Structure formats: structure tokens, C-alpha cells
Amino acid sequence: MADKNVSMRTPLSRVKGLGASGHGVEHWWLQRLTAAANVPLMIAFAFIVAALAGSSYVEALALISHPLVAIILILAVVSVANHMRLGMQVIIEDYVHGSAARVVAIIANNFYTVAVAVACLYAILKVSLGRILF
Amino acid sequence: MAEAKEAQRPLSPHLQIYRVTWTMAMSVFHRATGTALYFGFALFAVWLVALATGPRVFNAVQWFFGSPLGLLILFGYTWVLMHHLLGGIRHFIWDFGYGMGDERMALARLTLIGSIALTLAIWVAAFTFL
């Protein structure tokens, strides 16, 4: 009679500890890493948006294109986009059942977060780099 | 060849069988605020792309955000962001193994009161420095 507790895993897979998904704790870790980065970035973001309240086109251009503001915003967009992509993926995995719907939802999640992030980064860079010309 | 049988595994009970508690509500709310921020992030992209497009588009978008509806959305967004931020810090405290006992209620209360206080502080600051 064979031992029922024999693992199906190879010794190498157990040592690597990457689990069935092949990613190990990467998702969990990146979620925490971006969360930690988001704390100072979102505090700075709140100040930047507050400073933008009721500003004219020229005033808004001047503020967003300031190197310090632009760099903080780029860091914020990268960190936030990753954080919300991972967060929404967990929500989808918890509540969307059926493999087809789930796969479609996860693809849509990736498309949406990348599209929004690229739009933000493009706009920040265009406004910031354009300032060199005048 | 034997057919693969699907094991009748028990499903774990979900939200509806538990008594609603404050800490549970705050946990649900953390996901809800995260989802709101997820979609709200597109508003910032719209504003930035409008700025990059030119003064005409920018003025239209800026007018919307300055309208009563726009201000209401921004105010709500500020609160949701502050709530998710403080909720996230609460999760960090739990990740380090603290705050699992009776102080959970205090942490939940602190998140709620703190988020409202921070939101009001940001808006008062925004309007006084204007």
C-alpha cells in the first residue's frame, strides 16, 4: 500500500516555493511594496491637487511641468497603477466565477490600468518636456 | 481508462452567513474604496490629457471639476482616498502582527474619524491658500 502523504511535487519545486501559480508571493509582496510607496506619494498628490484648485491653464502647466512635481506624479502613477491592477485582480479572483469570465475580466483589468497609466505618463511628459522649448 | 471524477469539495461560507460587525464592514469598505479609486484614477488621466491637449479642452475639463457636481466628486474622491490610505496603514499594522486584539475596534474608529478629519483639512487648506 502506497503512502498517501507522498507529495506530487518535485524536491526542486518545494525548494523554490513558487506554488501552483509559479509566482510565489510576488503578487502579495508587490501589493505591499506599492502600498508603502503610495503613502508618501498620495500625501504629495493631495497637496499637488489642492494647489491646482481653480488654477488657469498657464498656472496648471507651470505646476505640472515643474520637475519635482512631474517626477512625484510619474512615481505616483507607476506605483498606483500597479497597486490597483493587483488589487482588482484579487477582487476578480474572489468574485468572478467561471474561467472564461474570469480570464476576460483579468485581461480587461490589465488593459484598463495600463491604458490609464500610459495616458497619465504621456501627458505629464508632454507637458514637462515641452516646457524646455519656451 | 478511468474517468476523472470531480471531488465534491465543501465551499467556504461567504459574507451572508456571518453577523455583520464593524471590523467586517471596514474590511468590505476597504475593497469598495479601492474599487472607487480604481475607476476614479481615470478622472486624473482625463484632466492630465486635457492639459496636454491645449487650453480649450483644459478649460472645459477644469470647468467641470469646478462645477458643483465636479467638486462633489473631488470631495468624495478625497475622502475615499484618505480612507483607503488609513485602511492600508491598518493592514500594515496587521501584517506586522499587531492590532489583532481588542484594539481592532479602535483602529477601525481611527480610520473612519481620521479619514474625515484629513479630508476636511485638505479642503480647508485648498480653499485658504487659493
Image (spheres, coloured by chain):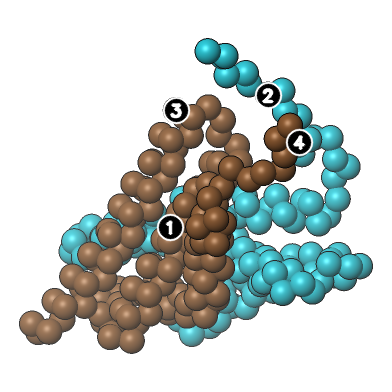
Query: Which chain is tinted brown?
Result: A
Q: Residue furthest front?
A: A1
- Quarter of the image holding residue B114? bottom right
Q: Which residue is mark 4?
A: B12
Q: Crowding near pointer 1: few (<14 within 10 Å), some, many (20+)?
A: some
The residue positioned 57% from the left and 14% from the top of the image is: B2
Which structural element holds mark 4? loop
Can you see residue B121? Answer: yes
Host chain of mark 1: B
> Horizontal and vertical percent for residue B71?
50, 60
The residue positioned 79% from the left and 64% from the top of the image is: B108
Give the residue type at disc 4. Answer: Ser
Q: Which residue is mark 3?
A: A100
The residue positioned 67% from the left and 71% from the top of the image is: B92
Which structural element holds mark 2? loop
Pointer 4 with pointer 1, Cβ within 8 A: no
CA distance for labels 3 and 4: 22 Å
Host chain of mark 3: A
Which structural element holds mark 1? helix
Query: Which chain is tinted cyan?
Result: B
Q: Crowding near pointer 4: few (<14 within 10 Å), some, many (20+)?
A: few
Q: Which residue is mark 1?
A: B41
Give the residue type at disc 2. Answer: Ala
